[in-house]
Image: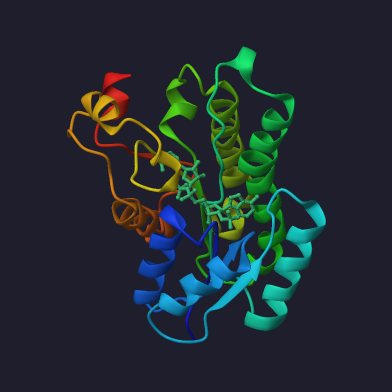
Amino acid sequence: MSRLAVVCGGSRGIGKAVSRLLAERGCRLAVVSRNEDAAQATVASLHGADHLAFSCDVSKVQEVQQTFDTIYKTCGNVSYLVNAAGINRDALLLRTKPEDMVALLHTNLLGTILTCRAALRSMLHSQGAAIVNIGSVVGLKGNAGQCVYSASKAGLEGFTRSLAKEVASRNIRVNLLAPGFIHTNMTAELMEEDGVRSVPLGRFGEPEEVAQAVLFLLESSYVTGQVLVVDGGLQLAM
Ligand code: NDP
């Protein structure tokens, strides 16, 4: 039977590329995002059949629990969980609105914690289950204009390492992938020329290049509690 992979934030960008690659590798996909039509459009573009789209705001406790309950009932136990749902609200701290701080922490950090908790019980019944959370290189290094975003991503590092310790005895692995600049909607408004100058490889990455690294972490049966940086060398220059 094919493995069930849940990709939160799978409707576009990095999550969509991950969904595509996992479907090509024979997984059955549950694609989650707030906009159901967009998740449905991703599902329609995937290789193979039987994939499903779910509308869910990962920052909402009850929505997450209900969505995962529906996923188990409809599709069975979760083998892979990829947390790629995320937002940015770039601004200097003094100009960051409190509601943006709450949205960043609730979506990027709490959202990932909630989906992991909701998925874990069913992952106990899957052989070789694995979680990949998507952090950011700025969560490791910090960045002016991204204090709260960086805090949300730095929080994911502690969460990922702790959860990896909690569930290792059940053979569930948990890793963090930290991208640099990747061509998606999130970076569409950046001045690419400025950003590229700080990247040793001299270009932004593509979502498909991140997806390859996510697949590596999902399939690497002896890797857990690690942070894999996929940034064209950006971290070296920060
Ligand atoms: P996109 O904006 O292209 O995609 C974000 C995805 O998350 C969409 O599917 C969106 O769907 C979903 N999403 C956002 N908020 C929620 C929510 N509350 N509940 C459920 N789904 C949600 O971004 P990227 O693909 O670039 O980003 C993916 C992850 O990678 C994010 O965590 C981001 O922080 C991280 N990252 C990205 C980098 C980059 O350069 N692009 C660099 C470093 C990290 P919808 O709006 O319908 O809910």
- From the viewer's side, name the closer residue of 146 and 128: 146
Q: In this view, does 171 lie above or below 202?
A: below
Residue pictured at 42% horizontal, 54% vertical: 13
Q: Is residue 115 above or below residue 122?
A: above
Could you say where residue 99 lies in the image, as x and y percent from the top left? 73, 31
Could you say where residue 17 lies in the image, as x and y percent from the top left? 38, 61
- Res 76 → quadrant: bottom right
33 horizontally vs 145: left or right: right
Residue pictured at 56% horizontal, 58% vertical: 172
104 horizontally vs 69: left or right: left
Residue pictured at 36% horizontal, 67% vertical: 21
Q: Is residue 25 visible?
A: no
- Res 198 → quadrant: top left
Q: In this view, does 133 lie above or below 12?
A: above
Could you say where residue 56 lies in the image, as x and y percent from the top left? 69, 61
Could you say where residue 142 lies in the image, as x and y percent from the top left? 47, 20
- Res 26 → quadrant: bottom left
Assign the C terminus to one quadrant of the image.
Answer: top left
Way the structure is coloured: rainbow
230 horizontally vs 178: left or right: left
Q: Is residue 160 visible?
A: yes
